[in-house]
Image (cartoon, rainbow, N blue to C red):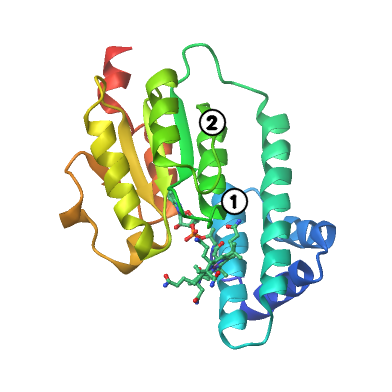
Amino acid sequence: MNGFHLHEFQLKKLVELMLEANDNKAWQLISSWMNEREDSLFFYEYALAEAMRYVGELWELNEITVADEHIASNVCNLLIARYHVEISNRLEDHTTESSLKGMFFCIEGEEHSLGIRMVTSLFKEYGWNTRYLGANLPVKDAVIYATKWRPEIIGVSLSIIYNLPKLMEFLSEMDKLDYRPEILVGGRITTLFELESHLPKNIRIVKELDSLNHMLQHNELCKELHVIS
Ligand code: B12
């Protein structure tokens, strides 16, 4: 293995198992690549996310159908959930009453939810009290939940450009509230377009899981809150 990256033949094998809906074999295969050095970032980014991008390429080339893509997505979901359970058992639950809170979802209209599921699990692994609100969450419901639960962090994902107006709507609604959560925006769209100049300054755009992992490791999120507590 070359650093974190899988060789093409390894990726192909993984994708093959995912397309056959063989989540158990896919799990075993990834596990066999993991050692102490290779962690959650390897599991989420270099195995699963890469595999899903490869599935996208196969679909673009007409080598697989939409139904195949759905199967692979479901296996990916199962593997994220299985890893989440595994890691929670290993670390035991270290969320406490005083844990920082984070809510995570895909903006209204957006169905690409695998990335934000990974993000939620990563926060949880670092001891955050997390709520995953899934795909296609209506803006008004996101605002109601945030107002009531008052999370310190709100993570929003979007992959498709035409969902951008809904993100802007959400941000402007959040701006009217009496409290200021830190808002992170991520997803495929952030790697395709320079959103920085279009979004308010207090919004953090996070292009890669790698950077998020670094921020979590070094307590770089909600810094002001860390100082207060
Ligand atoms: C799987 C998939 C689907 C699945 C999604 C299932 C699910 N539960 O998520 C289904 C079948 C539902 C789907 C539907 C559609 N899809 Co689709 N899909 C994909 C595919 C193959 C993989 C996406 C994926 O899961 N990637 C892996 C995840 C882990 O990556 P990620 O989302 O980028 O997340 C990573 C980072 O961005 C980051 N991240 C993500 N969110 C956040 C949030 C925060 C806060 C942070 C910090 C980080 C972060 O963390 C992750 C790990 O690194 C891509 C191909 C591709 N190249 O991406 C096409 C793709 C994205 N889809 C595409 C299209 C067109 C569609 C449809 C419109 C198809 C249709 N005609 O119906 C619909 C749209 C649905 C909608 N309204 O959203 C196009 C988009 C093209 C474009 N114009 O932008 C792509 C690129 C395929 C293609 N080549 O044409 N799709």
Image position, residue 218 (x, y; %): 37, 35
Q: Is residue 34 above or below residue 9?
A: above
**Residue 26 bears which disc, if any?**
none
The reply to whether callout 1 and callout 2 are in contact (CB within 8 Å) is no
In the image: residue 32, left or right of residue 216: right
Q: Amino acid at mark 2?
A: Arg
Measuring from the top left, give residue 116's x and y in whole percent. 51, 48
Q: In the structure shown, which secondary structural element does the residue marked by tag 1 occupy?
A: loop
- Mark 1 or mark 2, which has the lower sequence index? 1
Q: Is mark 1 within 8 Å of ligand 1?
A: no
Residue tagged by mark 1? 37
Q: CA distance from mark 1 to mark 2?
A: 28 Å
Task: Name the amino acid, label 1.
Answer: Arg
Whole-percent x and y of residue 186? 39, 52
In the rendered view, does 19 fall on the left or right side of 147?
A: right
SS at circle 2: strand
Query: Looking at the figure, which quarter contains the N terminus?
Result: bottom right
- Looking at the picture, does residue 6 appear above or below residue 93? below
Q: What residue is drawn where x is 25% and y is 42%?
A: 203
Marks 1 and 2: which is nearer the front?
Answer: 2
Seen in the picture, residue 157 relative to 18 is either above or below; the reply is above
Tell me if the residue at label 2 has its CB under 8 Å from ligand 1: no
**Which numbered circle lies on residue 131?**
2
